[in-house]
Image (cartoon, helix red, strand yellow):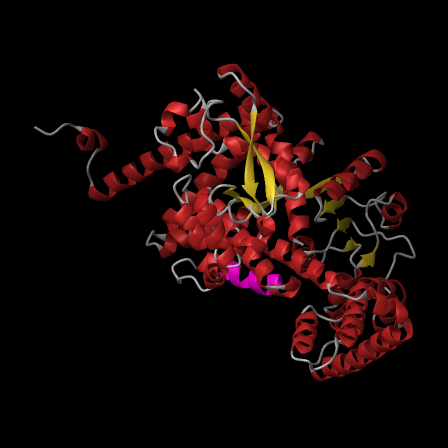
Amino acid sequence: MKRIIDLILLLIALVFLAIPMLITAIIVKLTSPGPIVFWSDRVGQYNRIFRMPKFRTMQVNTPNVATHLLVGAGSYLTPVGGFLRKSSLDELPQLWSVLVGDMSFVGPRPALYNQEDLIAMRTERGVEVLVPGITGWAQINGYRGETDTLDTFVDSSWYFIRFASQPDDQPFDRAIAEQWLPVGQYIGGVEHAILHLLYARFWTRALARIGKIGVTEPFKGLLLGLFFMAVGMNIDFGVLMGSPGKVAAILAGFLLIKLVVIYGLSRLMGIPLQERPVFTLLLAQGGEFAFVVFQTAVGARVFPEKTSSLLVGAVTLSMVLGPLLLLLMDRLVLPRFSRRLAPAPEEISEPQEAPVIIAGFGRYGQIIGRTLAAQGIRATVLDHDAELIEQTRRFGYRVFYGDATRLDLLRMAGAAQARVLVVAVDAPDQSLAVIDLAKQHFPHLQIVARARDVSHWYALRDRHITHAQREVFESSLASARSVMELLGQPPEAALHAAERFRAHNLALMAKMYPHHKDEAKLIALVKRGRLQLKEQMAQERAEADQQATGTPQDEATKPAG
């Protein structure tokens, strides 16, 4: 598991670091004689000696000892060696060691072959079983070179286990650690848990340094992926292949029992009949917690690993089959429920003669339709939402089912004889399609259109639609009036302010329209218009205050003395 993570991170790192590595190599070569890369003998997993590459930061005649033990170490540095070591750019060639498996991204830093005391202490504490890493605890916390004692301490297995119970002043670190610990233990042992905890610590600190400490979503997805990969690695596929009948029987019985129980609960809960099939099937598949329960049961010797593999395989198959069963239900079962439970929406079967056609009977179209009906004005209403049509039918409204972008439907709706077409559909693209169709085939129709936003309003103006209303503009002004009144302004003052803003905004929209495809010009006009409105409103408030106090404007502005 850890090896897979290393290889994925390696590919990502190479994409971003290939050019910096090339530039660093050229600088090293040009600034000092000798090879670009220095190969150091290091102690790896199980105390095996391996060759670790680094960009050379010291002169070729430097003694091969730990830097903190080197007397006058600064005199041995190359011209760019200090910078490379401080920025850790000299560590980049160690990606090669990750590729060949000698190192990992995160783990205890590899000791030099001649650091015998450090090697002995790590061996005594069992740390030699871990793969050394490019980044360890000391590096994450900003140390380098002089931290062999710290490394010896923090590389101890018991320290990393303690890490999961760190102080509460770092809750995010602790939360991630607690999630990684069971994953590592599930994969196969304390050593893996230790390294997964260190991975969590590394990425947490990295996020903290760039100000992203609150970003937890990537961790959730990564941990979930690791969890399922760990589950797959622990399945004995030989057992599954050898007992396909048992797996199928367990799967069928498991699904059948859950389907019956959940469907019964849905009836007791009062879930509508047409929603019960989806509700039942969504909950019928197995859950991730089953994997944890089965693994715990094996550890407690409740049943053998062979039984656990059969159960895990059945639960996994139920999760795989879930989307497929939902797809079949959507194609085969739900249409029958819809046909049985809901009458088919009424379509236009004969030509209509109403003077008004309303395309779209949502919240916007309904207000228009109800207002016209109150005045005794007949309207032919079209909508393509069958559920909406059924709801409006309960309240006594007759709405025909169909898509207003179809020419034959408009003809049947009486577009050739109607006087006004109200376009109140939700989607701007569909709205414009209806208008284009009507202007092409029924040019006599006067069109009243709903504009979703300013861009839609501009598109309507491009089609010479003069009766276009932004759907939330007037209601927003009414709400602004309410706010001003609640803050103590007289109702007439709030009304006047809202009307002034309305007039200014409409004038600004008309002024901006010729430039609506020029973003820079549009932004400049908006800023200038906002400043002008602010100044006008301030001047009007000042005049109102002067009138209230009876002070003439010239007296109010006259200097004192």
Q: Does residue 394 sit above or below 541 in this rendering?
A: below
329 sits left or right of 199 in the view: right
Name the residue at 64% across, 34% down.
Answer: 14
Q: Residue at x 69, y 43 (%)?
A: 449
Camera-nearest residue between 252 and 31: 31
How far across and down, in percent of the image, does residue 537 sit? 37, 37
- Judge whether residue 54 is colored magenta: no
Which of the two residues, 69 or 25, is positioned nearer the viewer here?
A: 69
Residue 168 in sight here: yes
Determine if the magenta segment contains residue 181.
Answer: yes
Query: Among all residues in the image, which is located at the extreme left?
Result: 561
Query: Would you identify the image quadrant in which residue 43 lies?
Result: top right
Point 83% across, 77% down: residue = 250
Quarter of the picture holding the N terminus:
bottom right
**On screen, residue 561 above or below 43:** above
Magenta highlight: main SS: helix
Q: Is residue 530 above or below residue 9?
A: above
Where, quadrant-wise, is the C terminus in this rendering? top left
Q: Determine whether, in the image, residue 37 is placed left or right of residue 546.
A: right
Q: Position of residue 513 (x, y in %)?
A: 60, 28
Answer yes or no: is residue 137 visible.
Answer: no
Q: Position of residue 314 (x, y in %)?
A: 81, 71
Count of numbered labels shown in the rendering: 0
Q: Locate residue 25, reporting x and y percent.
A: 57, 22
* Quadrant assignment, res 186: bottom right
Instruction: Give the magenta range.
Output: 175-184
Q: Is residue 149 left or right of residue 556?
A: right
